[in-house]
Image (spheres, rainbow, N blue to C red):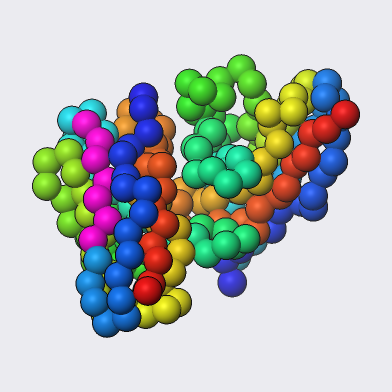
Amino acid sequence: QSALTQPASVSGSPGQSITISCTGTSSDVGAYNYVSWYQQHPDKAPKLMIYDVINRPSGVSNRFSGSKSGNTASLTISGLQAEDEADYYCGSYTSGITLFGGGTKLTVL
Amino acid sequence: EVQLVQSGAEVKKPGEYLKISCKASGYSFPTYWIAWVRQMPGKGLEWMGTIYPGDSDTKYSPSFQGQVTISADKSISTTFLQWSSLKASDTAMYYCAREGGRPLDIWGQGTTVTVSS
């Protein structure tokens, strides 16, 4: 299985919205509603932000939302804040294992 | 509080054996899968494999099958990741994470492994 495909970088100004895509195949992203998104600040452990495509864990801001269409999942962050600057990874369950995307660096201008 | 606490940083030589650990607390350890994730310097996350401590059922990513061994000891609520013969390319940060259903919902703080002659 190959890693999921994410853009290497995205950027936005404070207050704006950005969307990060995560493209897989009909065997992973397209096959299951088990896409998750993780935020990782430098030198910190990843943090779960979205699970099962659209759900937010308790404590995660509602500025973060997820969606999926076919083999592509998306993470949208609205009302960008400086603290959102981080690396973001998607993950998808497939055949008993988890695949990650290559990661997207979000820069808040 | 639900948490995973990993063992400390390791510096090893190529060919050496290593076993790092991840101790769980605050929840029923046997009933959740625990995964191990590698992050090489400056790179992304790679899912290595997972174990169900209840019966030690284990699954590995094809990329890591045969390269590492994942095990668990229910009596001390701890999961382990071990190498029989380290390589320089094993230098990385290693995270354990609870697979709460499908997502990795609780993460350890990470263990840095450095392999250098």
Q: Is residue A69 left or right of residue A56?
A: left
Kindly give the residue lying farthest to the top in the view shown: B66
Query: Magenta stretch: residue A45 in it?
Result: no
- Indicate the position of residue A19 as horizontal and vertical percent values: 23, 61
Residue B33: x, y in percent?
50, 43
Q: Residue furthest front?
A: A109
Dominant SS in magenta? strand
Residue B22 visible in image: no
Per the rendered image, the range of residues in magenta is: A19-25
Q: Position of residue B101 (x, y in %)?
A: 38, 49
Q: Is residue A23 magenta?
A: yes
Count of numbered circles on the image: 0
Position of the N terminus of chain A, as image quadrant, is top left
Q: Is residue B67 left or right of residue A33?
A: right
* In this view, B1 is above or below B5: below
Q: Is residue B66 above or below residue A16?
A: above
- A107 lies above or below B114: below
Judging depth in this view, the residue of B38 and B74 nearest the camera is B38
Quarter of the rendering containing residue B21: top right
User: Residue B9 at x, y = what percent?
Assistant: 79, 49
Name the residue: 24% across, 77% down: A16
Can residue B98 be seen by looking at this rendering?
yes
Q: Residue at x 43, y 69 (%)?
A: A85
Instruction: Name the residue: 79% across, 34% down.
Output: B115
Residue name at image x 68 percent, y 28 percent: B89
The quadrant in which residue A84 appears is bottom left
Work out which quarter of the rendered image holds the C terminus of chain A and state it.
bottom left
**Residue A90, above or below A63:** above
